[in-house]
Amino acid sequence: MSARAIFVNALTFSRVPFIFGWLAFAILQEFSSSAAFGVWATVALALAGSTDFFDGALARRWHVVSSLGKMADPLMDKVFYVVVFPALTWLIMHQGDTTHALVMLVFTILYILRDLWVTFLRSVGTMFGANVAAMMLGKVRTALSFPAAGFIYVYLAWQSHLSASLRESGLLACYAVEAFMIVLNLASFATYTRSYWPYVKKALERN
């Protein structure tokens, strides 16, 4: 394996320590009066999102796209989802906004269920030699997940420093982002289901 390939794979796997670094700093900020933890948490989350963009871009540019990278990248995305979105739900609940926490809980459940379902569909598709590469809508969903999570976290981390009107505007913006991502998630769910359903039917007929 070349040095460039090693670097790209290391960049992909670095998403995990950045994600857990964000989690640690976010929790510390929640129980501390120091704004520094919020800053470090924001930086860690931004770096986690950056790895998702740069690993694939560099792999293609340097011609070091590998089977390992293709499997590791979506795995790192799933780590992001199962750590960041439940943590955001807890942060919202801890801050006392049960309505927003409920919306974020629904958001999180739908995200995780969609990934489990798509993984199942791809597994069925491989039984029949289907092309299981990520679809464009799925790529868009993944790419937007990082800034969406970042926006929600920044609001949660700094809302106590905002005026009442800005807090209200920020909350409405969070709801808008979450609603858009829920719709995008459901659209991706439907697109993958429609594409892979013929293979599911074949699998059912085979049994």
Image (spheres, rainbow, N blue to C red):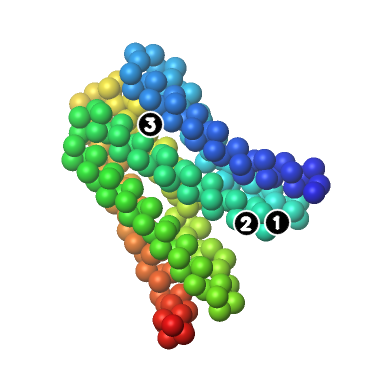
- Residue shown at 37% from the left, 53% from the top: 111
Mark 1 or mark 3: name the one nearer the start of the chain. 1
Q: In this view, does 162 lie to the left or right of 9?
A: left
- Residue shown at 42% from the left, 40% from the top: 83
Task: For mark 3, give the secondary structure.
Answer: helix
Q: In this view, does 180 lie to the left or right of 206?
A: left
* Residue corresponding to mark 1: 66
- Residue shown at 77% from the left, 45% from the top: 4
* Residue corresponding to mark 3: 154
Task: For mark 2, give the secondary structure.
Answer: helix
Which is more foreground, mark 2 or mark 3? 2
* Residue corresponding to mark 2: 70
Tag 3: residue type?
Val
Relative to 191, say whether 99 is above or below: above
What is the crowding at mark 3: few (fewer than 14 residues within 10 Å), some, or many (at least 20)?
some
Tag 2: residue type?
Lys
| Residue placed furthest toward the front | 207
Gap between marks 1 and 3 measured at Cα: 35 Å
